[in-house]
Image (cartoon, rainbow, N blue to C red):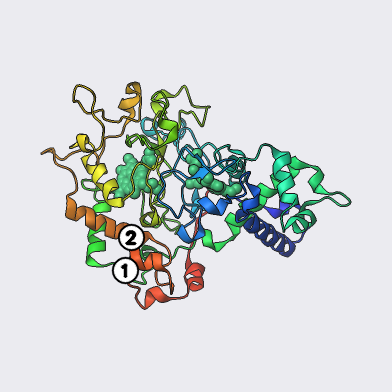
């Protein structure tokens, strides 16, 4: 679904011309991605929130980014990384069809882009920030079209998209469509979006060994009685040879604490319920989906400075401690009611609190102990740090900080590593 075929846009072009056309389109998309003039404030490009130096996620530790006409309005959700979105499957309400013999009891929604899966393609997705009042805040297609017409790449844009004898800038809706296709092409074509250069990728390719601590972390990640992380964040090469995505694209309510620093949460009656609204409206009657957000990839997670859909956490250690103490020591994480009782799952109205998942690692041990102790959390974090791209790339501070020292094998040229990467396209 994310495949952009130039051939369908320009049927007369030969395959080579189509490839060159796709590259030109991607180049226009790259220019637009970094162009702050496309926002109402003039201060916000896609790259401001999705910084290429931070795996296309924010450089700062704000729980949500600022946008709008003055670039001062808070958004409502944490900004995800744009890496590895190629593997994303289109949104399905039931992952297993009723008639395919699958286990329908387990059938849950999966796929799609954004935290609630409300769009399927990168070009539809780009429309959200371009027009969202808290983000790039363009009033309408005409306003955005005027900005593209004034951009340094306007002539190239006109040449690429105008029909013979016509100036496309007379058709704002077409400008918006072609701009979003260019942004999509950039995210598809540029290898920066799927480098597969983490230490763990090198390990899966048999090029490096993990350290003893990283191996212990990997074992905890996989162990169904300890981390059980791989159950939702799968970490193995697929039977068809695709490198792991670290997400099964599934939606789960895990009961993340309410983030009281968000302006949208000042209203005690406001709840971001993910799949069942308010941003997406088609599933609002599905109350069993309330509170469910997509399982994010854990690739490059050690470079993030805010975690979960509402940015409620700012360190991996807190995230890990919360996972295993949510049900053993909830008073550490949730506020108290007037009577002293803990208001567990306080970011969900009481009626939906039963939706919250309580499998391992949330589920306490038989002795009501957390599944992981402090040392095991250290080990798990050491493993998560091997998921940072740029391992062995000279001068890459992020990977050096999070992935340990490169070995000879890890220092191989990125292009060579890329050439060997098999990557599966969704059917
Ligand atoms: C003000 C910060 C901001 C700006 C500017 C911004 N984004 Fe985002 N982006 C976000 C947030 C927040 C989300 C999550 C939205 C949600 O879940 O509702 C997101 C989600 C996405 C996603 C989906 C990622 C996923 O994991 O599903 C894509 C793709 C994306 N943005 C591309 C872009 C493009 C292209 C632009 C420029 C046209 C852009 N963004 C501008 C903040 C921003
Ligand atoms: C039942 C499925 C499930 C299991 C098991 C699970 N996760 Fe998650 N994980 C999720 C979901 C869903 C989210 C997003 C929740 C939200 O934001 O509301 C998430 C978010 C995260 C995040 C935040 C990432 C970000 O970009 O903000 C980290 C880190 C993480 N998980 C690590 C782990 C680790 C490590 C384990 C094992 C100890 C684990 N998870 C087990 C489903 C799961």
Q: Is residue 133 left or right of residue 195?
A: right
x then y, percent, for residue 54: 45, 58
Residue at the location (51% across, 50% down)? 49
Q: Which residue is mark 1?
A: 404
In space, the residues marked 1 and 2 are separated at their CA atoms by 8 Å
Q: Report the disc number at residue 218.
A: none
Q: Is residue 96 above or below residue 211?
A: above
State yes or no: discs 1 and 2 in contact (Cβ < 8 Å). yes
Residue drawn 37% across the image and 46% down it: 307
The spot of residue 163 in percent (x, y) is 83, 50
The residue shown at (29%, 67%) is: 210
- Residue shown at 10% from the left, 39% from the top: 367
Q: What is the quadrant of residue 262 in the picture?
A: top left
Q: Is mark 2 within 8 Å of ligand 2?
A: no
Q: Which mark is residue 385?
A: 2
Would you say the beta carbon of the disc 1 residue lies within 8 angstroms of ligand 2?
no
Query: On the rendered structure, is 281 left or right of 170?
Result: left
Q: Is residue 320 above or below residue 333?
A: below
Q: Residues within 10 Å of mark 2 (few under 14, many from 20)?
A: many
Q: Tell me the quarter of the picture where residue 406 sits.
A: bottom left
Is residue 112 in view from this perspective? Answer: no
Q: Is residue 246 left or right of residue 281?
A: left
Q: Callout 1: few (<14), some (14-19), or many (20+) C-alpha neighbours within 10 Å?
A: some
């Amino acid at each position: 679904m994310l495949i952009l075929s130039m051939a369908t846009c320009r049927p007369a072009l030969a395959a080579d011309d189509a490839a060159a056309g796709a590259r030109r389109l991607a180049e226009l998309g790259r220019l637009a991605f970094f162009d702050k003039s496309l926002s109402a404030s003039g201060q916000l490009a896609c790259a401001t929130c999705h910084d290429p130096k931070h795996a296309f996620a924010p450089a700062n530790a704000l729980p949500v980014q600022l946008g709008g006409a003055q670039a001062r309005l808070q958004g409502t959700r944490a900004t995800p990384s744009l890496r590895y979105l190629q593997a994303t499957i289109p949104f399905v309400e039931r992952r297993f069809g009723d008639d395919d013999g699958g286990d329908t009891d387990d059938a849950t929604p999966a796929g799609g882009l954004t935290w609630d899966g409300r769009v399927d393609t990168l070009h539809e997705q780009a429309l959200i920030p371009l027009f969202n009042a808290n983000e790039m805040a363009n009033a309408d297609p005409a306003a955005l079209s005027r900005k593209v017409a004034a951009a340094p790449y306007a002539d190239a844009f006109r040449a690429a998209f105008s029909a013979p004898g016509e100036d496309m800038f007379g058709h704002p809706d077409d400008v918006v469509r072609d701009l979003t296709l260019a942004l999509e092409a950039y995210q598809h074509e540029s290898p920066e979006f799927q480098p597969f250069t983490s230490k763990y990728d090198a390990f899966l390719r048999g090029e490096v060994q993990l350290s003893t601590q990283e191996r212990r972390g990997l074992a905890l990640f996989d162990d169904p009685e300890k981390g059980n992380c791989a159950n939702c964040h799968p970490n193995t090469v697929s039977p068809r040879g695709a490198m792991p995505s670290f997400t099964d694209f599934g939606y789960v309510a895990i009961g993340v604490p309410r983030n009281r620093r968000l302006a949208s949460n000042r209203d005690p009656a406001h709840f971001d319920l993910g799949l069942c609204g308010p941003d997406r409206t088609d599933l609002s009657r599905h109350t069993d989906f309330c509170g469910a957000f997509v399982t994010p990839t854990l690739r490059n997670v050690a470079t993030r400075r805010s975690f979960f859909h509402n940015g409620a956490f700012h360190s991996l250690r807190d995230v890990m401690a919360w996972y295993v103490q949510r049900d053993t020591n909830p008073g550490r994480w949730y506020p108290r009611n007037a009577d002293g009782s803990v208001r567990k799952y306080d970011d969900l109205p009481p009626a939906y609190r039963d939706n919250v998942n309580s499998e391992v690692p949330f589920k306490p041990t038989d002795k009501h102990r957390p599944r992981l102790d402090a040392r095991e959390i250290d080990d798990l974090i050491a493993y998560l740090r091997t998921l940072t791209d740029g391992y062995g790339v000279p001068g890459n501070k992020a990977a050096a900080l999070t992935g340990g020292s490169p070995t000879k094998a890890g220092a191989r040229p990125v292009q060579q590593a890329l050439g060997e990467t098999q990557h599966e396209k969704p059917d």
